[in-house]
Image (cartoon, grey):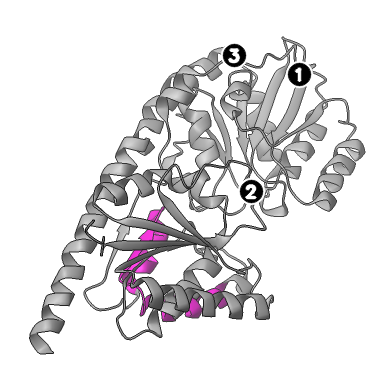
Amino acid sequence: MRKNNKKVLLVTTVSGFLPQFELNNVKLLQELGYEVHYASNFNHPAYKKSCNFDELGIRTHPITIRKSPFCFWENLWAFLQLRELILRYGFSLIHCHTPMGGALARLAALTVKKKPWVIYTTHGFHFYKGAPIWNWLFYPIERILACFTNCLITINHEDLAYARSFRLGKNGFSAWIPGEGIDMETFHTGTGKVTKEQLGIPEEALFILSVGELNKNKNHIAILKAMEQLKDPLIYYGICGTGKHKYRKKLLAAAKKCGLENRFRLFGYQEQVEKYLQAADVFAFPSRREGLGMAALEAMASGCPILAADNRGTREFMKDKYTGIVVPPDDISGFADAILQLKNKQYRMKLSQNCPKRARHFCKEASQKRMSRIYQECEKRLLLNASNQKRNG
């Protein structure tokens, strides 16, 4: 059997990232003839979605990488593990994700003599227009790491402008993709439904739903405070997602303080969120920072009007008064006013008709098409580099 010399290493900080977001990329790489390897921390999965790596033809490599840069010794060991993997398997291509995965993979690739072509997908730079001053500490780090990156992929146009201002590696280029792509059939058609009655919500009530991790950045408290202002007993709010126990307690305490403990639901992690979206009247996406916002796009695909905070991610897909209503993330009165507008069923139906049309621009097929072109362009430039090295060597 002929040995496959086309090997690619995918690197992420948490192992659940690949089954959650990268299976389409695995398929594209395998179609191009690559043997796919995956390095990640398999002891700390951040997503509950899993897959059988062996059945998918993916070779896995556990490493000690941690999300926090302050886990110095674990990340130092992960760097050495990545370097050893690159030397052992001779990867021609590395595609890395997540801040720490991207940093360690690029540094490890820099230290070997036969350097692989390195792709880094940023799912949202920490720095952005209007970001707190400390977030901009990441700017010089990303600018330096870009020098060791051959292809820098972003999921929004604000980040793309920064990427294009960076000096990339030899023959490097930057590109934009519409996220990992929505499965329009799953979300637009739906697979079953959770009813309001099953959730203990009156049929005549306005049911607002959010999907995402429970953390400060997601800004769920803004919706609770807006509901407190309205004092309407027929407005309910629920969240599908998990997070740190202390923040979950904080949300429940805030709901109690606002007098909403009977109208606020925490549903936990739900693998089939499309069922809950079928029951929702409005999807709330009040995040302060988003790279794009796949949860909101999935809600749009299901025909659910969006109540969104204005940030670089939502600017990619939201059209105010067309797919929903956009307000500043700290404008509690703005959220309250938007909820009042969205109580109008006729207005919601008008917005609902527009949502899937807009979401189609971010469908799985559109994302795959762009990623296929990016991988092919990377291959072309990789071969050109190899040819030049051979000629000069």
Disc 3 to disc 2, C-alpha distance: 24 Å
| 283 vs 368: above or below | above
- Which quadrant is the C terminus positioned in? bottom left
Per the picture, the main secondary structure of the magenta-coloured stretch is: helix
Where residue 377 sits: x, y (%)?
20, 59
Residue under label 2? 329
| 83 vs 6: above or below | below
Residue 164 part of the magenta-drawn span: yes
Q: Are marks 3 and 1 in contact (CB under 8 Å)?
A: no
Image check: 49 left or right of 266?
Answer: left
Q: Identify which residue is drawn at 65% across, 75% down.
A: 74
In primary-sequence order, the first of circles 2 and 1 is 1
Q: Which residues are magenta?
A: 136-165
Outermost residue, bottom direction? 393
Image check: 153 left or right of 293?
Answer: left
Where residue 335 sits: x, y (%)?
67, 37
Where residue 254 sits: x, y (%)?
86, 42
Q: Identify which residue is drawn at 64% across, 48% down.
A: 329
Q: Nearer the viewer, mark 2 or mark 1?
A: 1
Residue under label 1? 199
Residue under label 3? 345
